Image (cartoon, helix red, strand yellow):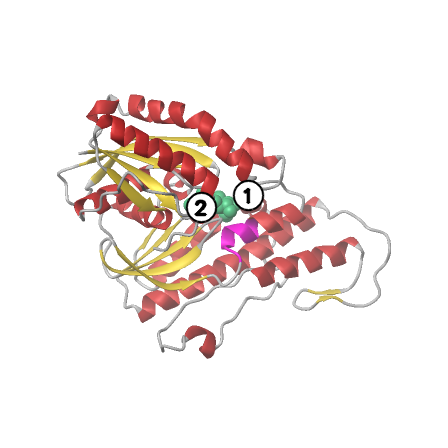
Amino acid sequence: MLMLGIETSCDETAAAVVEETADPRRPWRVCSSVVASQVAIHREWGGVVPELASRQHLRDICGVVERAVQEAGVSLPAVDAVAVTQGPGLVGSLLVGVSFAKSLALALGRPLVAVHHLAGHIESLFLEHGPLPLPAVVLVVSGGHTSLFDIRQAGVYRSIGRTRDDAAGEAYDKVAKLLGLGYPGGPIIDALAKEGNDHAVLFPMSRMTHRDRVAPERTVRFEFSFSGIKTSVLRYVQGQRIGAPIDAARGVRGEPVPQARTLSAQETRDIAASFQRVVVETLLDRTFAAAGWARAKSIGIAGGVSANSRLRRDAAIRGEAAALPVFVPSLHLSTDNAAMIAAAGLRRFHEGARADWDLNADASLAL
Ligand code: KG4
Ligand code: ZN
């Protein structure tokens, strides 16, 4: 069976063809995966501009789908079903993919499957590695989400924690912006941090109390918070620029010296490394704690931030120490793509999911 996946939830127009195989260890094979990135357009504005994003999806969607089919070496009528991201995401962007997928499926006389964007990120792990040992704890960490899922049965995702404020990728992007490094910030900070001292600045880690972790209904939660570290970096940078004594945990102290100065390249690298250390430690502390609580047999980390080199390295080291296999998708399956949507679509298809022709985009779709 050939599934065509379409993804337009944010600033990437993506289409992919994924084939079902007869091998239970690798049930899905990526035949093609095409991503048209809008980064160059949004970079100028320091972040994604929703109106520009939806207009660009309109321009790119036909060519991207055509190329995905071509690169898979098939023709459109060979496609057995169409899967599309229904949400969450930017509503104008989602609408382009949903409308296109509905029209295409109707014209081809093929079934349509609606997919949740985070289910796509989770399934990117199964697409890349085959079935994960279950139960698994999966961290989805991207520009819009930082969420933990307990998976006891393939295709059933139980939320056990999420961020209370910013997503980790959002914190990367905001810190890069305030350091004047450009957009998107994740890959830039990742590269700079390699040359920085990660203990140069001791930014505080967010800690959760017992009450934070145990919800009123007495269910355990593994919550994250990343707005505090972003503010600490901002205060630290402001303090350095005006030469004021600084306490990273509390902000600027004492009388500021009035001349502003720019940070040196090494100071910027040190801040990047120190920020990244705290973010990665926070992500891994919670994920491994959740895995212990769930008695997980494996850990998965997916989403754009899973491309981070330190997160990958530290996760592998901790996994080895805990004798717990850690799975991460390859780089092109970490950031937004349509192969993961096609894979999630195949799973949903076999569960019997079919979307009606009145399917609508849902910007805050729940998983
Ligand atoms: O999954 P994704 O492509 O889109 C969303 O669903 O949000 O994730 C994009 C996010 C951006 O915030 C970007 O800065 C971050 O992933 N990112 C990274 C790296 N590569 C992308 N963050 C840290 N290190 C990276 N190497
Ligand atoms: Zn994503």
Residue matched to label 1: 191
Amino acid under disc 1: Ala
Residue matched to label 2: 89
- Quarter of the figure with residue 366: bottom left
Q: Where is residue 44 in the image (x, y as percent from the top left)?
A: 63, 34
Inspect the magenta stretch and tell me whether residue 167 lies in it.
Answer: yes
Q: Where is residue 80 in the image (x, y as percent from the top left)?
A: 20, 31
Rendered-image quadrant of the N terminus: top left
Instruction: Classify 10 Å Cα crowding around label 2: few (below 14), some (14-19), many (20 and above).
Output: many
User: At 45% across and 29% down in the image, what residue appears?
Assistant: 58
Rendered-image quadrant of the C terminus: bottom left
**Does the image show residue 200?**
no
Q: What stretch is highlighted in magenta?
A: 166-172
- Quarter of the figure with residue 82: top left
Element marked by disc 1: helix
Q: Residue 51 carries which label?
A: none
Locate residue 29 relative to residue 333 in the image: left or right: left
Instruction: Classify 10 Å Cα crowding around label 1: few (below 14), some (14-19), many (20 and above).
Output: some
Q: Where is residue 210 in the image (x, y as percent from the top left)?
A: 45, 78
User: At 22% across and 46% down in the image, what residue appears?
Assistant: 353
User: At 26% across and 41% down in the image, what residue appears?
Assistant: 356
Provide the major secondary structure of the magenta segment: helix
Establish whether ligand 1 lies closer than 8 Å to the Cβ of label 1: yes
**Earlier sequence position, callout 2 versus callout 1:** 2
Establish whether ligand 1 lies closer than 8 Å to the Cβ of label 2: yes
Element marked by disc 2: loop
Locate residue 125 relative to residue 174 in the image: left or right: left
* Placement of 176 over or under 38, stated as above or below: below
* Placement of 231 over or under 42, stated as above or below: below
